[in-house]
Image (cartoon, rainbow, N blue to C red):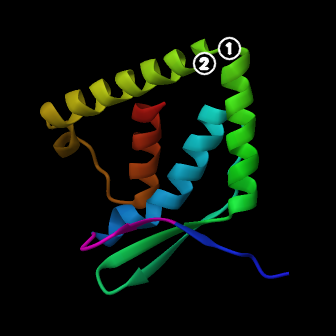
Amino acid sequence: MQKKWHIIANEYVVSLFPVFMSPNSLANGIKKTVGKTTGEFAIKLENNSVTYLYLPELWKKAHLYFVNKIKKDYKVLSGIFQRIKESSQALVSFTTNLQVKKLNLSSVRELNHYIKNIAY
């Protein structure tokens, strides 16, 4: 059976480097935050634009799981908001202090490793 992909977002005039990391980062971040996978994400590149695609069946299951989790304990959201705040502050601090220039981020693997340590 062929998978039925749906569009989740479009971006125009984008840099390809972060685009290739986005589906994996998004899927891992959602699984870690929600506690359930939303399945695969895909990207479609045309000219300088990108279309992000997802599989709705798994997305719906993850959505319902997360809604039930919040209904059982609404404080789940405050924990998520706190993590977002902390990650955002770390990113602002990182860029403000220009620490990027001190790092040898010569490969995608090194950059992914560094970003994971900041974000989570």
Which quadrant of the figure has residue 86? top left
Task: Judge whether residue 35 can be spotted in this image.
Answer: no
Labels 1 and 2 touching (C-beta < 8 A): yes
From what the image shows, is residue 72 above or below residue 31?
A: above
What's the distance in space between the residues labelled 1 and 2, CA to CA? 6 Å
Give the residues drawn in magenta, as a range.
Answer: 8-14
Q: Position of residue 103 (x, y in %)?
A: 26, 43
Q: Position of residue 20 (x, y in %)?
A: 44, 67
**Image location of residue 62, percent across then percent down:** 71, 44
Q: From the top left corner, tell me how far across and down residue 113 is, in percent.
A: 46, 44
For mark 2, what is the residue? 76
- Using the image, determine if residue 74 lies above or below residue 54: above
- Left/right placement of residue 55 relative to residue 18 reads right
Dot 2 alpha-carbon crowd within 10 angstroms: few under 14, some 14 to 19, many 20 or more? some
On screen, residue 50 above or below 37 = below
- What residue is shown at x 34% (from left), y 71% (from top)? 16
- Which is nearer the eye, 49 or 93? 49
How many numbered badges does the structure rendering display? Answer: 2
Q: Is residue 93 left or right of residue 42?
A: left
Q: Nearer the viewer, residue 91 or 38?
A: 38
Q: Secondary structure at mark 2?
A: helix
Q: Amino acid at mark 2?
A: Val
Q: Which mark is residue 73?
A: 1
Is the N terminus in the top left, top right, bottom left or bottom right quadrant?
Answer: bottom right
